[in-house]
Amino acid sequence: MAGEADMTSWTDLLNNSTKLLQQAAPSTEFPPIQRSLDQLEALSNKLKAKTSRLEVPSHNIAATRLLAREGINAEQLARDLKSFELRVHEMAMLSAIQAAQRDNLRSFDDYMLQVLEDDWEKEKRDFLLNMSRLPTISKANGGISSSGISQSVRSLSGTATPHLSQGAQSMEIVPATEKPFLEKKASAYADVVRNLNAERERGLPFKVATAFKTTYEELASETSGSKSVSMQKIWNLLQALLGEDKEAPKNLSRKMVMVIGARRHLEAGYEKYILDTIHSHAAQAALGGATGNLQRIRAFLRVRLRDHPVLDFDASDGRRHPPVDTTWQQIYFCLRTGYYDEARSVAQSSRVSQMFAPQLAEWISSGGMVSSGTSTLVAEECERMLRLGDRAGRAGYDKHKLLLYAIVSGSRQQIDRLLRDLPTLFSTIEDFLWFKLAVVRDTGGASSSLALVPEGLAPYSLEDLQNYLNKFEPSYYTKNGKDPLVYPYVLLLSIQLQLAVQYLTKEAGNEGYNIDAVHISIALADHGVLSEGVGSGHKLGIMDAVAEIASIIQQYGSLYVRLGNLSLALEYYAQAASAMGGGAPSWMGHTSVDQQRQREIMLKQLLTEILLREGGIMLLLGPNGTGSEGALRRFLPDRQTQHLFLLEAARHCQESGLYDKSVEIQKRVGAFAMALQTINNCLSEAIGAIARGRADGDTRTAGLVYSGNDIIEAYKFSGVTSIQERDQIAERQTTLRQLEAILAVHKFARSGRYGESLRELTKLSFLPLDSRSPDITADAFQNLSPPVQACIPDVLKVALTCLDNVTDTDGTVRVLRRKIANFVANYLPRNWPQELYDKVAQML
């Protein structure tokens, strides 16, 4: 019974002390956190020392007695310890007691002290790392700031994620601990890029903008707050622009398809606005059980015109109380919301003139591209209304009639006049842009029927809209940066794609809009629409615009190269090359010859960059080094193309002085003869550079000779038994030795040792210059390898220079002159430098 009473007291002690700590507010009675930590640690050590000298009690109140010996009670702990420190011990003790009771442990004190030690170390680490999460203690209470610890924690992190800052020309690496959302965004987008490339390789369809949009929505971390445009809204717009949400019309240009997509996006947004209005004014809307689109428009008009008399569609007797005629408003708001069938139905069944109803139907069915005759007739009627002031003194519906006539006519002059005379037509920029997109006509093609529009009724073009929007600075749209996505949203709506991407790359805030910019670029490039979105405010040409977008994608991928993630860098590099090639069709070779050439050039350049990085050979060529198991086959499936690429890469390495890397590449694919041929070609060019006076020629040729010998040695121990490979190695080894001999002639001549240079020249068995050997035929010379043949003119010029600087004591010089002259005269075809022929002629 005594034991049970003691246990009850112990439990009450813990509960009471916990309540005291939870209710305690920061005050001068609580010591500073750091002093409490020191006291707590000292107390813990003292507790361990005292307990280690005690015998194990036979009952479960040992901990209470131990605390009593130390003169410590719950009230003293509540005064001396902050809630965090005391809770560490209290919870650990309670856990130990409960575990001992469950398991009937005989050594409770040992178990309790072990739990105390483990929990103390863990909680102390967690406390220091999460100091910023604790309530801030006022300076009057001796508290410390958490900023220093937070900065220390950030500095410990080595994890990083790439994102753009200050445009495409500047990028930075952001620590993941500082911007975890950016890390998640970059990772999620990267998964989409991987899937996109995989589907493109197989020639399968993939809705890239939809995938990015879905991925962004899954992040579920953006809070637009007071901002009118969010990144999710921009992805929705891109989905509509690129036609991934609805099949695009077949008879329209790509530019007009994008215009219609932008307009459809604004219509979907307005539909949501109408439904929200009806829902928030349910009594006034009086929608009832009707769910049709036209019923929704009428319910919206009931709310919008609630201060007006009875509306026409609600009037039971129009003769006694003439209702408000809402015909034009119904048609306009049906169009504004995308309810085209309902707009056509209202026009056909109302008091709309018999002329306008079919003209409106033509505008709807043609996607806005009405015939020149229809455009002219409607424009003339619109001009008449503007001229006579038909709108003055009428109810609000007249302006909607003018808007509808202007939309169908598409006349630039009437639209400008309408907006000038009625500057308050639109209350939001989205309403304004929808109207402008509705009146845009495709004026780019010579076959367009609008080319027949009479003078003075020129159609409103997309360039007209772009020019108007670009008159205002970005700050006008973004409210001086407070709503940063409005400006790129406006640019995208007006099909100024590249300008929108460029602006977003400069927005390196906490939301990481520059990361979105890169992946927006990928979506636009994959659809091949960059040529349609240069924009009137851009001075670059179409190809320059495509190259700039490809560069943005490439630079983003290069950040992963710097991080050592070559696999992910390769995915972005593939998209950069695809952008240059025209997008998705380029994967299957369905773009123009020039686009395919641009894609191939960029792809090989980027593959070479990865190849030269640490781990790049393993990634591209696979563990066996043949390329059949590596990533190279994804982009260069043909084996011969792979070898040509590797030779080109090896040559690039040689020219860059990366001889070891070149040898490694060739060894991994087992192309020893090809590698040696590359060395010979490079050595031949280097010898030519020496002949032209290049200062660093000796160093370069020495490295090439060493690399060539290393390849020969590697071949000997490779176990390759191919007769063809063996013969090629023997042939190219002979070429290497011949080039070494020619190199010796040049070296002696450059050092002024002309006699030794001539002696080395006469040792060249493949040239008929030894006085003791017979002349060889031109056919024998033709059998020399091209690298050696390329060096012959220069070595002969050097020989003539040496002959001019030595004394003929025994007639040897005269014989050598004659042999050189005969050899040059008999060589066909005569494609050597004219300078050599002139020197021989002067010598004779």
Image (cartoon, rainbow, N blue to C red):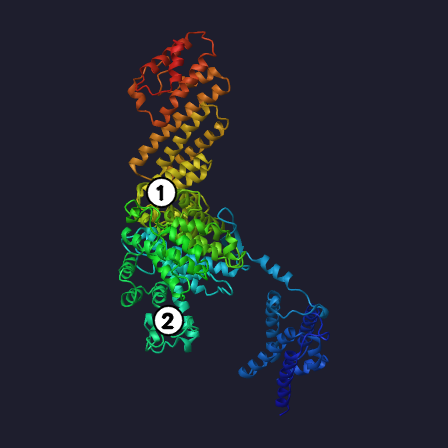
Image spot of residue 172 (x, y percent): 52, 51
Q: Amino acid at mark 1?
A: Glu
The quadrant holding residue 242 is: bottom left
| Disc 2 from disc 1: Cα separation | 66 Å
The secondary element bearing badge 2 is classed as loop
Q: Quadrant of the N terminus?
A: bottom right
Amino acid type of the residue that numbered disc 2 sits on in the rendered structure: Val
Q: Residue at x 38, y 67 (%)?
A: 271
100 or 583, which lies in front? Answer: 583
User: Which one is in front in this view, the residue at disc 2 or the one at disc 1?
Assistant: 2
Q: Nearer the viewer, residue 794 or 3?
A: 794
Q: Is residue 296 left or right of residue 657?
A: left
Q: Quadrant of residue 2?
A: bottom right
Question: 466 or 301: which is nearer to us?
Answer: 301
In this view, 486 is above or below 36 = above
Q: Element at badge 1?
A: helix
- 418 above or below 394? above
Residue 14 is left or right of residue 413, and the answer is right
Q: As rendered, which of 138 and 297 lies closer to the eye?
A: 297
Q: Specify few, some or many for label 1: CA neighbours under 10 Å numbering under 14, 14-19, or 20 or more.
A: some
The x and y percentages for residue 733 are: 37, 30
Q: Quadrant of the C terminus?
A: top left
Q: Quick check: 215 above or below 555?
A: below
Q: Position of residue 526 (x, y in %)?
A: 36, 51
Q: Which residue is mark 2?
A: 324
| Tag shown at residue 600 | 1
